[in-house]
Amino acid sequence: MRILILGSGGREHTLAWKMSQSPLCDSLFVAPGNSGTFQVATNFEIDPTNFEAVIGLVKSEAIDMVVVGPEEPLVLGIHDAIKSDKELENVAVIGPAKAAAELEGSKAFAKAFMNRHNIPTAAHDVFTADSLQKGLQFLSTLKPPYVLKADGLAAGKGVLIIDSLNEAQATLKDMLENQTFGEASRTVVIEEFLSGIELSCFVLTDGKSYKILPMAKDYKRIGEGDTGLNTGGMGAVSPVPFVDEMFYNKVESRIVRPTIAGLQKDQLPYIGVVFIGLIKVNDDPFVIEYNVRFGDPETEVVIPRIKSDLVELFASLNQGNLKDYPLEIDERTAATVMMVSGGYPGDYEKGKEIFGMKGVDGLHLFHAGAIRVNDKTLTSGGRVMAVTAFGENHKVATKKIYDQIEKINFDGKNYRKDIGFDL
Ligand code: AMP
Ligand code: GLY
């Protein structure tokens, strides 16, 4: 099989690393890829949202399967664009059709979906510039803190949690009237604040049946002890120790099953992964959000725990026989620590050479914002490299990482020293 992965982060390097091990994988391409995918595949300097260029590549390289990493091309309709090309009808696209990708593309759509299918989530209402007065009034009926969400994609920055009513009302006005988040905040979802501990649940589906992948927990804040600004994710652990059998069963019966059944009822074609962002409130799960792709850095701990052949697994999604697929999972714990550029998630410099990667032993280095230039590996983003290890529990796994992480060097490097601290 000739396979193309779209994207350029740690998630895509992890997928490429795993898929390249499959005997079913004859040739592997990544667009645009990074210095990590360069080790296991051929990179093409193509933007995944440039559909004409992507389709051109699928044709010129006679690709059989396209795996879509990030949300943007999915929300823009890459699945439909490939499938509607007469020559490419038989290409497998791992990632949902545009209509289903609205689960991530519009928070109002996702909330309506959850309400329609009785899936537990925070109470909410939706407002536009025309209903601003009602929105201001609605805020005054809620208890603080106030949760305001730009409806559309906002690169992970569209959710605001605000303590004071005055500030929340001023922010709502700004989002709707001045479109602080551009098109994304033409519509704003206001919801009840839920207090609990978050976790990520990835569900593979062929549109009919599903398999729940190992749960993971990511660490979103830049600072130790979960303090400071939000980032794309500073580390992750899988499995999640606080997920016992009872909680798992609640997630499956109250959330996963109605989600997959809801997709079918609403005729939303789905081949790929549903990433359910969950929050555990007391002993009950609620959905914080849906994403229509793998999470990053959760992928860097979830995928290494899959023992099965990932190409075969993705092919079973496309063939509609996931139900019979014997998914095998590594029982050990995987942890990952993200090395980031100094200053991230604020301003940071790029182009710093990365040294010392060959000196580490028994770890997986998944490159994220890192590129290959001549014979050097240079930083090219805020999140630079995910360092993953296995252990019998998260303490053993993170100790393995922290024992060696200092061997990897680049100017200004930063990482959290407490991944798993709260487990
Ligand atoms: P989202 O982009 O929807 O995942 O939201 C980003 C983050 O905001 C989540 O990971 C939560 O930490 C937080 N968040 C979103 N919605 C709520 C809510 N209703 N209650 C509490 N925290 C929330
Ligand atoms: N780690 C969260 C995300 O990928 O959205």
Image (cartoon, rainbow, N blue to C red):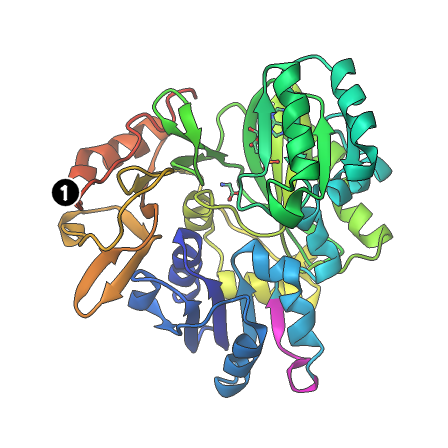
Q: Is residue 287 left or right of residue 418?
A: right
Q: In the rendered image of this protein, does residue 282 appear above or below residue 33?
A: above
Question: Which segment did they paint magenta?
Answer: 86-93
Who is closer to the viewer here, 227 or 183?
Answer: 183
Three-letter code, disc 1: Lys
Q: Is mark 1 within 8 Å of ligand 2?
A: no
Question: Could you tell me residue 314's position as x and y percent?
Answer: 57, 63
The residue under the point 35% across, 45% down is 383
| Residue 89 inside the magenta-drawn segment | yes
Quarter holding ligand 1:
top right
Q: Quadrant of residue 414?
A: top left
User: Residue beneath label 1, please?
Assistant: 407
Who is closer to the viewer here, 401 or 311?
Answer: 401
The residue under the point 86% across, 39% down is 116
| Residue 192 inside the magenta-drawn segment | no
Q: In the rendered image of this protein, does residue 32 appear above or below residue 274?
A: below
Question: Could you tell me residue 78's position as x and y percent?
Answer: 63, 67
Secondary structure of the residue carrying tag 1 is: helix
